[in-house]
């Protein structure tokens, strides 16, 4: 282990490193393959903001947009083609890893239109459409963990489709997500699906919790309040891992596991440090356990590769101290429930805003391409 890179050591401790980014440029230039080869990347996640940045800041999509314009595609149809094409190509790139890990890793995620986050039936329909279009065994369909999304998660899993549940901030919602997952797996079993082929991750967001709570602690302004800064994100995630351990050790789950079901893995998302005062690998090295996924923006991945420290399991048995952090915050007037409700709302608003920007930009590009033709 002494000669291994930091990312290799973390992988050796059981952490799956996924990249939180995808673009046609990464696929064409081989930069994504290089991250797989050199920095232990074994999966990819995408979101509306990632696609908005990829498509609007590059000429790599110009030819494809021109083809869509020539075909008379609507802006929604064009974006559907562009994004699913990238994801399908990335799935092919990661296929050897998926095969080697029996589908546990080698996964690529694509999210339903964020404007459907409050529409259960619409989410179910688009999830099926995305799955059919990408047509790769190692794709994960991302569904936001809204109240309306919970029923969709169950229904999509029941069809045998693997799911990445995203935008989870609260422990209560995480419990609801696991319940929705287990209900979906039970229905999949009843529908005759091979449970060993259905995979899922639950994306629990980390850094945004600190960003919002730190802002509130600064507003309180006492020394005691300031001393609590930078602790909530890790504490919240550690308590989420406790929820994971509890809910996947029940008799309800054991029955499904005996039928071949695979547990829904915790995935740490939003792991880029927003405050430069904190260590840039904080949300990686402090959240390690076997079987956990950490999806990192490239900046965080490179920092982890350069100087990340593997301390082994930094999750198991940390729950009492983590609970003390959240209790201390409540005692000085920082409402956990208020924070997580706000973060879910803001997270969805950001994705919808990015999607609307993408729609507007691609619409302009389609019109320009049509005129040029």
Image: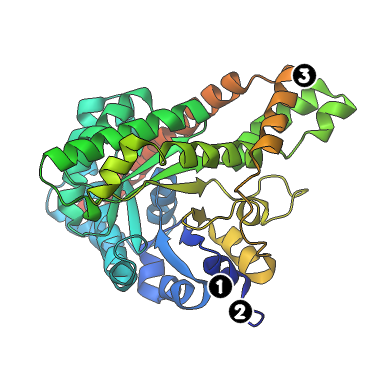
Disc 3/disc 2 C-alpha distance (Å)? 44 Å
Residue placed furthest toward the bottom: 3
| Residue at x 61%, y 76% (from the top left corner) | 5
Whether residues under marks 2 and 1 lie with C-beta atoms below 8 angstroms apart, the answer is: yes
Q: Residue furthest right?
A: 223
Q: Nearer the viewer, residue 334 or 10?
A: 10
Q: Position of residue 270 (x, y in %)?
A: 54, 45
**N-terminal of the two: label 1 or label 3?**
1
Q: How many marks?
A: 3
**Do residues under tags 3 and 2 come within 8 Å of each other at their CB atoms?**
no
Give the colour scheme shown: rainbow
Find disc 3 in the rendering and name its residue.
Answer: 332
**Residue 255 horizontal/vertical position (percent):** 27, 41
Mark 1 element type: helix
Q: In which image quadrant can residue 125 be found? A: top left
Please give the residue where the numbered disc 2 appears in the rendered image. 4
Which residue is identified by label 1?
8
For disc 3, the neighbor class at 10 Å (few under 14, some 14 to 19, many from 20) is few
Answer yes or no: do the residues labelled 1 and 3 have beta carbons within 8 Å?
A: no
Q: Position of residue 13 (x, y in %)?
A: 56, 65
The correct choice, above or below, for 114 with respect to 289 in the image is: above
Tag 2, which secondary structure? loop
- Residue nearest the viewer, comparing 95 with 240: 240
């Amino acid at each position: 282990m002494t000669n291994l890179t930091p990312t290799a050591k973390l992988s050796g401790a059981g952490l799956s490193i996924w990249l939180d980014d995808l673009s046609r440029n990464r696929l064409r230039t081989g930069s994504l393959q290089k991250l797989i080869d050199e920095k232990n990347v074994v999966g990819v996640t995408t979101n509306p903001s990632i696609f908005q940045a990829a498509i609007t800041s590059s000429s790599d999509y110009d030819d494809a947009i021109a083809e869509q314009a020539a075909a008379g595609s609507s802006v929604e149809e064009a974006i559907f083609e562009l994004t699913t094409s990238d994801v399908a190509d990335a799935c092919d790139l990661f296929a050897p890893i998926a095969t080697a890990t029996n589908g546990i890793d080698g996964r690529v995620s694509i999210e339903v239109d964020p404007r459907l986050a409050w529409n259960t039936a619409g989410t179910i329909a688009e999830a099926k459409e995305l799955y059919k279009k990408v047509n790769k065994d190692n794709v994960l369909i991302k569904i936001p963990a809204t109240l309306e999304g919970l029923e969709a998660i169950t229904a999509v899993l029941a069809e045998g489709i693997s799911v990445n549940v995203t935008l989870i901030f609260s422990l209560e919602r995480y419990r609801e997500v696991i319940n929705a997952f287990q209900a979906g797996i039970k229905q999949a079993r009843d529908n005759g699906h091979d449970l060993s082929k259905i995979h899922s991750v639950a994306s629990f967001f980390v850094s945004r919790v600190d960003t919002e709570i730190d802002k509130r602690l600064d507003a309180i302004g006492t020394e005691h309040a300031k001393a609590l800064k930078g602790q909530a994100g890790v504490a919240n995630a550690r308590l989420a891992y406790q929820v994971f351990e509890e809910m996947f050790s029940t008799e309800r789950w054991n029955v499904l596991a005996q039928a071949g079901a695979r547990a829904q893995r915790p995935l740490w998302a939003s792991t880029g440090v927003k405050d430069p005062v904190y260590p840039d690998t904080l949300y990686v090295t402090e959240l390690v356990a076997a079987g956990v996924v950490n999806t990192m923006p490239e900046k965080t991945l490179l920092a982890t590769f350069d100087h990340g420290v593997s301390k082994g399991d930094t999750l198991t048995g940390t729950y009492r101290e983590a609970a003390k952090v959240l209790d201390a915050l409540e005692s000085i007037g920082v409402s956990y429930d208020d924070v997580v409700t706000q973060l879910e709302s803001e997270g969805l608003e950001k994705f919808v805003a990015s999607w609307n920007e993408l729609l507007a930009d691609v619409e302009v590009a389609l019109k320009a391409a049509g005129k040029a033709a």
